[in-house]
Amino acid sequence: MKEPTKVFETLLSTEAPPEVERMGLTWLVAAAIATTVLWQIPGGDYILYPFTILATWFHEMGHGLMALLLGGQFQKLEIFSNASGVATYRIATSLGPIGPGLVAAAGPMGPPLAGAALILASRRFKTASLSLKILGIFLLLSTLIWVRSWFGLLAVPLLGLIILGIALKAPHWVQGFAIQFLGVQACVSTYHQLDYLFSYSAGYLGLSDTAQMQRYLLLPYWFWGGLMAIASLIILIQSLRVAYRH
């Protein structure tokens, strides 16, 4: 006779019936569409405010971590109550124009890549739960190391604690759905900033990320904006396909 723990682990690793998977996938696709629509209408930002803050965190962390990976410095991260953010970093000059171009691209591509990783982690309960814990802990650590705005010092650790609470206390199905939902929200957040992707200016901050890419990688900013919008959609679709593949 199998031990109860072994039986329970077997049940967790068993693939869900096709109709259950279709229902879950349908809800996620519906959530992605609804989110994209809500971001385009007045008041929608308030409904999705926590996810917008998380997407801003992914975006700015993308800039800072890419700068670190390329041998530069990630000095500080600021997130403000209007859901905007700024990452301050120094870039190593040894890579020439490629370095600044990659750091500029890492911001807009940070949320969809992080979202895809979360969706793929949902394939098994253990990786889903572990990924939620890692995300929550990393939010808390980033607050200590890089976050330097008053709003960010409140919002970022609060998000981290909520995600950690889900990872530690919520039922397994809630954890699985939560990590997929967060992943989908991160991927579609690209379409919250469509106007930014296709803008040359970032206001008082100077050039937009796509304009920075034009400056260092030559092709026009609208080309890079369109490429990243298409890439985000492909990343979302492919990650969901892999996650729901038998």
Image: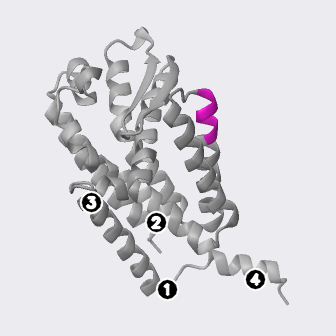
Q: Which tag is nearer the camera, tag 3 or tag 1?
A: 3
Mark 2 lies on residue: 243
Which of the two labelled residues, at mark 2 and mark 3, occupies the earlier sequence position?
3
> Is 230 displayed left or right of 59 in the figure?
left
Residue type, mark 2 in image: Ala
Is residue 245 visible in the rendered image? The answer is: yes
Are the residues flagged by discs 4 and 2 in contact, CB closer than 8 Å? no
Question: Residue at horizontal 32%, vertical 71%?
Answer: 30
Q: CA distance from mark 3 to mark 1?
A: 32 Å
Are the residues flagged by discs 3 and 1 in contact, CB closer than 8 Å? no
Q: CA distance from mark 2 to mark 3?
A: 26 Å
Along the viewing direction, whichever of 231 and 211 lies nearer the viewer? 211
Residue type, mark 4 in image: Val
Q: CA distance from mark 4 to mark 2?
A: 23 Å
Instruction: Residue 125: name its quadrant.
Output: bottom right
Are the residues flagged by discs 2 and 3 in contact, CB closer than 8 Å? no
Main SS of the magenta part reads helix
> Is 37 displayed left or right of 123 in the figure?
left
Name the element at disc 4.
helix
